[in-house]
């Protein structure tokens, strides 16, 4: 086996890992992803420990009703005329399933530790609990995702890339001369798609800050956003120790290893810090993007 052959095999392996880790369900079962978007309740059948009813007590039920009412208000503010189910799930961050085009009610998942009494949590977990403003920010992010149909956009894009990748690799498998070109193309397209998804996430962060700014000052809203992400990162460190395959999923710094479609924690916090600048609201209203404001800041420095 010559060096060229080994390189080709290695390239295929790297591509496969990237595609499988970032769009596993799109390759294995695209029907499942589309079905879960259309009927979000189906997603609960593929998850474990989703909203166990026997775990609720009076305090947690009160919290759940409070969050449900808050989400109703947020949906009204963002033009979503759908009821939203609030579920909790262990070892999970704030997330959502479905969107405005879903037939059944979309779902927003709240981390279990946010619903249950503090005395049931460790001292370390209690320190990482989000306050009311931070919870509102994270719930707003999920409502914006539902409004923008982020789930559907990601699913369709991943399915398209996966089908193209599989078709191209199979079609050109007999011609080694095209193999590296096709593989590089697949990696490139997948990378661009992930960059697009990351920009979508940053826009959602910004829209959620703008929404919270109606209640708080702009600077305070950005501070709340930053604080919520920092606490969630600390919580990920606990998940690393407790969750199944936690050490594989999270780094020692609490960063997700295989979530290529979301911006890194460092990039996300950097964008939020740029938004905190006093001149940000003025420049943004004049049409400058977050990245262009950051560039202006660097040039000025």
Image (tube, rainbow, N blue to C red):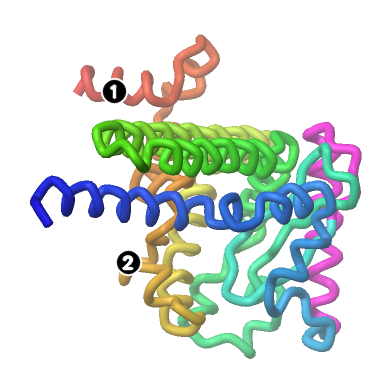
Main SS of the magenta part reads helix
Q: Residues within 10 Å of mark 2 (few under 14, many from 20)?
A: few
Residue hosting label 2 = 253
Quadrant where the N terminus is found in the figure: bottom left
- Please say if 73 is above or below 57: above
Residue 240 in view in this figure: yes
Does label 1 or label 2 sit earlier along the sequence?
2
Residues in magenta? 58-84
> Tag 1: Cα neighbours inside 10 Å, few (<14), some, or many (≥20)?
few
Res 114 label: none
Front residue of this view, candidates 129 and 244: 244
Taking the view exactly as shown, the residue that stands out farthest to the front is 174
Element type at marker 2? Answer: loop
- Residue 219 shows in the view: no
Is residue 4 in the magenta section?
no
Q: Residue furthest top?
A: 286
């Amino acid at each position: 086996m010559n060096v060229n052959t080994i390189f080709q095999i290695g390239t295929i392996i790297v591509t496969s890992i990237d595609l499988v880790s970032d769009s596993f369900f799109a390759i294995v079962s695209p029907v499942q992803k589309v079905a879960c978007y259309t009927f979000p309740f189906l997603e609960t059948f593929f998850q474990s420990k989703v909203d166990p009813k026997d775990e609720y007590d009076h305090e947690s039920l009160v919290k759940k009703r409070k969050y449900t009412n808050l989400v109703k208000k947020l949906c009204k503010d963002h033009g979503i005329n759908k009821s939203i189910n609030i579920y909790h799930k262990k070892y999970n961050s704030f997330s959502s399933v479905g969107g405005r085009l879903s037939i059944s009610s979309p779902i927003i998942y709240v981390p279990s530790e946010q619903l249950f009494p503090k005395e049931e949590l460790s001292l370390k977990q209690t320190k990482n609990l989000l306050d009311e403003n931070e919870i509102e920010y994270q719930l707003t992010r999920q409502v914006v995702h539902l409004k923008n149909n982020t789930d559907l956009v990601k699913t369709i894009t991943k399915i398209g890339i996966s089908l193209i990748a599989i078709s191209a690799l199979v079609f050109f498998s007999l011609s080694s001369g095209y193999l590296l070109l096709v593989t590089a193309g697949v990696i490139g397209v997948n990378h661009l798609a992930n960059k697009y998804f990351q920009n979508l996430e940053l826009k959602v962060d910004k829209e959620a800050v703008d929404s919270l700014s109606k209640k708080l000052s702009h600077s305070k809203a950005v501070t709340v956003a930053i604080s919520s992400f920092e606490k969630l990162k600390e919580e990920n460190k606990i998940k690393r120790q407790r969750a199944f395959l936690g050490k594989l999923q999270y780094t020692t710094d609490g960063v997700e290893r295989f979530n290529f479609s979301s911006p890194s924690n460092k990039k996300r916090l950097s964008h939020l810090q740029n938004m905190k600048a006093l001149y940000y609201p003025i420049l943004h209203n004049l049409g400058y993007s977050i990245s262009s404001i950051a560039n202006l800041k660097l040039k000025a420095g």
